[in-house]
């Protein structure tokens, strides 16, 4: 009788935060790799999130940001009490929007004939997804309890690579992704939003749809 190898899932949870609000977010323009800071509201958002992380005892062993200023500032505010090791990984940077950087999303949608081609003189979606997935996979393998501070497009690209669509990532909120990063698929993964309402901890399992969508949002 021939024995068959059965893959036993090695589930790991990583925490993911999109950076605090910027003026580009307020204006609904594509930021891409423009190195802008978070605004006053973004600072306040990060401080509120830092308090929530303390209340729910989220203590990552490392904080990794994209290296772009808005992610670095958010990471530093979140790490003020945690005091974990902080580092950067350029693979976590937002997609390079090329000619679309600084352009309103409505105008981009009007000019976007094929949503998966990427921006003129910018990064292709295929290349973007590839670098994002490689970053998350290596980080999950190298660290026990990482907190990743990155960008909306990065979060969407991770799931888009595996043909999942997630709700639009909000600024400075805490997501928890539990998955087996040793497999070439996120099948069976769970994506949660951790928040607080009236001093009550709320953990919401976010829906994952099996339809691929463009990264413009």
Image (cartoon, helix red, strand yellow):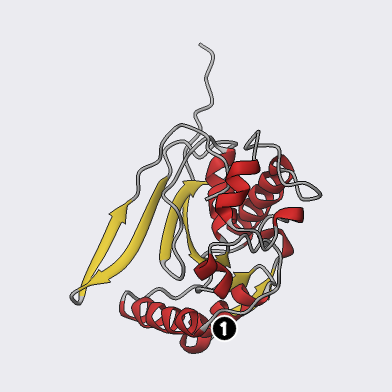
Residue toward you, 52 or 170: 170
The residue lying at 65 percent from left, 33 percent from top is 114
The residue lying at 60 percent from left, 73 percent from top is 71
The residue lying at 40 percent from left, 50 percent from top is 191
The spot of residue 169 in percent (x, y) is 46, 57
Q: Dot 1 surroundings within 10 Å: few (below 14), some, or many (20 or more)?
A: some
Residue 80, compared with residue 136, is above or below; it is below
Return the residue at label 1: 76
Residue 1, compared with residue 148, is above or below; it is above
Residue toward you, 61 or 103: 103
Q: Quadrant of residue 139?
A: bottom right
- The secondary element bearing badge 1 is classed as helix
The residue lying at 40 percent from left, 77 percent from top is 49
The spot of residue 163 in percent (x, y) is 53, 35
The reply, left or right, for residue 39 in relation to residue 57 is right
The spot of residue 180 in percent (x, y) is 50, 45
């Amino acid at each position: 009788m021939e024995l068959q190898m059965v893959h036993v899932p090695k589930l790991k949870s990583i925490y993911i935060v999109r950076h605090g609000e910027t003026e580009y977010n307020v204006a609904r323009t594509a930021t891409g790799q423009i190195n802008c800071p978070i605004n006053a509201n973004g600072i306040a958002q990060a401080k509120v999130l830092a308090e929530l992380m303390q209340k729910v005892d989220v203590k990552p062993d490392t904080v990794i940001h994209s290296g772009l200023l808005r992610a670095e500032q958010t990471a530093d505010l979140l790490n003020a009490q945690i005091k974990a090791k902080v580092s950067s990984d350029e693979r976590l940077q937002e997609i390079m929007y090329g000619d679309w950087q600084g352009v309103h999303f409505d105008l981009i949608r009007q000019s976007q004939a094929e949503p998966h081609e990427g921006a003129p003189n910018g990064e292709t979606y295929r290349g973007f997804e590839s670098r994002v997935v490689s970053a998350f996979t290596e980080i999950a393998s190298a660290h026990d309890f990482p907190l990743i501070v990155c960008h909306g497009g990065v979060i969407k690209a991770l799931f888009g690579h595996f043909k999942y669509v997630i709700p639009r990532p909000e600024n400075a909120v805490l997501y928890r992704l539990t998955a087996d990063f040793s497999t070439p698929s996120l099948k069976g993964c769970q994506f949660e939003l951790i928040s607080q309402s009236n001093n009550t901890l709320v953990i919401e399992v976010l829906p994952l749809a099996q339809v691929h969508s463009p990264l413009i949002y």
